[in-house]
Amino acid sequence: MKNLRAALAMTLLALNLSFWVIPVTLFALLRALLPIPSVQRFIRQIMEWLAVAAIAGDTLVWRFISGVQIEWRGTPPPEVSGSCIVIANHQSWADILLLQHAVVYRTPPLKWLAKRELLYVPVIGLICWAYGYPMLRRYSPEQLQNNSALRDLDAAQIHRACLALRNQPGTLMNFPEGTRHTEEKARRSQSAYEHLLSPRTGGMYNLLQIMGDDLTGILDLTIQYPQRPARLWDFLAGRHPVVRMQCEFIPRADLPFMQTGCDQRATLRDWLTQRWSRKDRLLGGFLSP
């Protein structure tokens, strides 16, 4: 019965995504063909409404078909009017469904800092292109060490994608771990954490360089599923009826790496390490009987 529920939910999510990607693509093409600022602003507003409608459709599916509810530890995300960055631990494709629902009505329009490989995924790739999501190539430490120019290529791509934030506030979603947590990945990377992979600094550092004074703050969300591994299929089947989430908003004034005169990359690395240690302890508390 649960597998039938998951199949129905997956089908409805696919239909919802396929339905909205058609007008989104058409408006994105129209925006590219009409480089008139006032027209582009109007089209961008329409595309933001379409994104909100698509997210609402997704939420209806996983709440009422899969029967999943969010249990907030503390308060839900606050309303943020200026540009912000959302960071979260990453375990499942279900994270995307939960995070977009958590912030869509509380923050400026969403943009995902995503892996470049997603551009080649049907439908999802079109959405990434239409909304101009910053796309990152994932390089190994050995590749970066042998060719430092690779880091500059990523920075240039993100810079172009984020220029629009200078004129209009936006919310950038980032998974600092870079990929979904699994026991195998944790062993292979020799992660220092029990429930997390080690956070990467590069993508977030590039975002901070671009956003600069426009950054309002950072929303740090922690997601915990009652069963592990947290597979999307199990989520849609209702095997995770309650997902626990905790949110903390750190305003710009409290971010040590935004202070004048600091070594921003090193300070950001230390800050992320501390946040991830705290998040690991929090997940341990969530998972305790």
Image: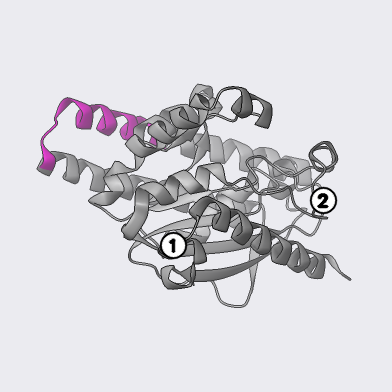
Identified at 53% across, 48% down, the residue is: 174
In the rendering, at what x and y percent does residue 260 appear? 40, 64
**Which residue is farthest front?**
261
* Element marked by disc 1: helix
Determine crowd level at label 2: few under 14, some 14-19, many 20+ residues with C-alpha closer than 10 A.
Answer: few
Q: Main secondary structure of the magenta part?
A: helix
Specify whether residue 109 is in view: no
Disc 1 crowd, CA 10 A, few/some/many (<14, 14-19, 20+): many
Q: Position of residue 30 (x, y in %)?
A: 21, 29
Residue type at numbered disc 2? Arg
Q: Nearer the viewer, mark 1 or mark 2?
A: 1
Mark 2, residue position = 228
Q: Is residue 2 above or below residue 138?
A: below
The structure residue drawn at horizontal position 56% and vertical position 70%, both measured from the top left corner, is: 248
| Screen quadrant of the N terminus | top right
Nearest the camera: 229 or 277? Answer: 277
Residue range (magenta): 20-37
**Sequence order check: which comes first, mark 1 or mark 2?**
2
Q: Position of residue 18 (x, y in %)?
A: 46, 32
Q: Is residue 25 magenta?
A: yes
Horizontal relation, residue 191 to residue 18: left or right: right
Whether residue 30 sits left or right of residue 129 in the image: it is left
- The residue depicted at 49 percent of the width and 61 percent of the height is 257
Tag 1 residue: 258
